[in-house]
Image (spheres, rainbow, N blue to C red):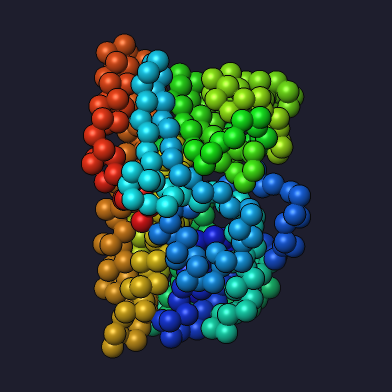
Amino acid sequence: MIVGGGLVGASLALALAPARMKVAVVEAHAATSPPADDAWDVRVYAISPGNAAFLERCGAWSRVAPERIARVEAMRVHGDAPGARLEFSAYDAGLRELAFIVENGRLQHALWECLTRAPHLTLFAAAECARLAWEPDAVTLTLSDGAAIRSSLVVGADGAESWVRREAGITAKPVPYGELGVVANFSTTCRHQGIAYQWFRRDGVLALLPLPGNRISMVWSTSEEHGRHLLGLDHEALAASVEAASGETLGALSVVTPPAAFPLKLQRVAQFVRPRLALVGDAAHNVHPLAGQGVNLGFRDARELANVLADRGPQRDCGDYYLLRRYERARREDVAALQFTTDGLRRLFAEDRAWIGRARNWGLNWMDALPPLKNLLVRRAVS
């Protein structure tokens, strides 16, 4: 059983179809109606081509209308000194795109449409978990209405504040950044041409991601004080602030979706697995959003766990600890590497000593002059 029917939990449930097992998905929220055609979700994700292919195998990707997906064909990263720039190009790396930008609500709805149609699945929506009890050969989840679900394996896909993780007694080490991720959508007077932009600034990291048409999605990772200031601005003042911070790269901006914010933190989890338990997605790790890889890490968790369970051979017990350790060993390096990289970059650009500033901006230009290294990084990111 999978506790949590968000993007990662739902994709894992669908990916388990070839594993020849019955699956229950327990989700605290009720199913929602499809998003309105004229509505734009303030929360968007940059989905790697590898994970888009995974979602297609799950049956969900093709359920998202193509006109609501934008391709990222290039990315321009600017340092905090004039002329410091690093550019990644899908064309130079021999790829069609670096990522796809898709709205959270539309992808979630597509996954839930598939969940309701999958013959190997039982969906418990609007269900509140009460307690978990482990036995040598099974684990039992009791819901608040008294219903009980008994299974060989429970997967915690219930987010950064995972209830399943707490019930299992697995420790998490959160490191709050004291920052907010402020998000909003804008229309632009200049075409984005499929380019994603990022600025490492003294007041945080500003990213503008292409949406379909002349629209962009903003993610501004900044101090809590500055974040609250941005949230308090009227639409015209917010647009003017983003225009100025981005050097008017995309011309005049107009707010399409009002801003929202979420707190940022790094979180390391002691274990991904225990007997009859596995953690995936934000329940297993949190990273800074500057690389746009958080949800991609989660989808790679789902891919790996589904593969391990499908390839278990004569091992019929899907909750066997040594089987689950294969999943943990496969995922630890990828997660640790991204946590180290994003945390290191965030700290590097938050440092105000002059010599470190010169070094980091020189580093951007140095890497930009090395196409083989850039293409190696691109190919790792698109997996």
Quarter occupied by residue 129 = bottom right
Q: Is residue 90 left or right of residue 259?
A: left
The residue that appears at 74% across and 48% down in the rendered structure is 39
Q: Which residue: 34% across, 86% down? A: 316
Quadrant location of the C terminus in the rendered image: bottom left
Count of numbered badges drawn on the protein: 0
287 relative to 155, above or below: above
Residue 94 x, y percent position in the rendering:
33, 50
| Residue 5 relative to residue 303: left or right | right
> Quadrant of residue 310 in the image?
bottom left
Q: In the rendering, at what x and y percent does residue 133 appear?
A: 48, 73
Please name the residue shown 37% across and 33% down the image: 87
Q: What residue appears at the point 31 percent right and 59 percent down from the top-left corner?
A: 331
Q: Nearer the viewer, residue 205 or 9?
A: 205
Image quadrant in which you'd find residue 218 = top right
Nearer to the camera, 89 or 245 = 89
Indicate whether 11 appears above or below 337.
below
Compared with 213, 299 (above or below) is: below
Where is residue 203 drawn, in percent x and y? 50, 21
Evaluate whether residue 221 shows in this view: no
Q: Is residue 61 left or right of residue 360?
A: right
Closer-to-camera residue (102/266): 102
Tell which residue pokes out farthest to the top in this image: 354
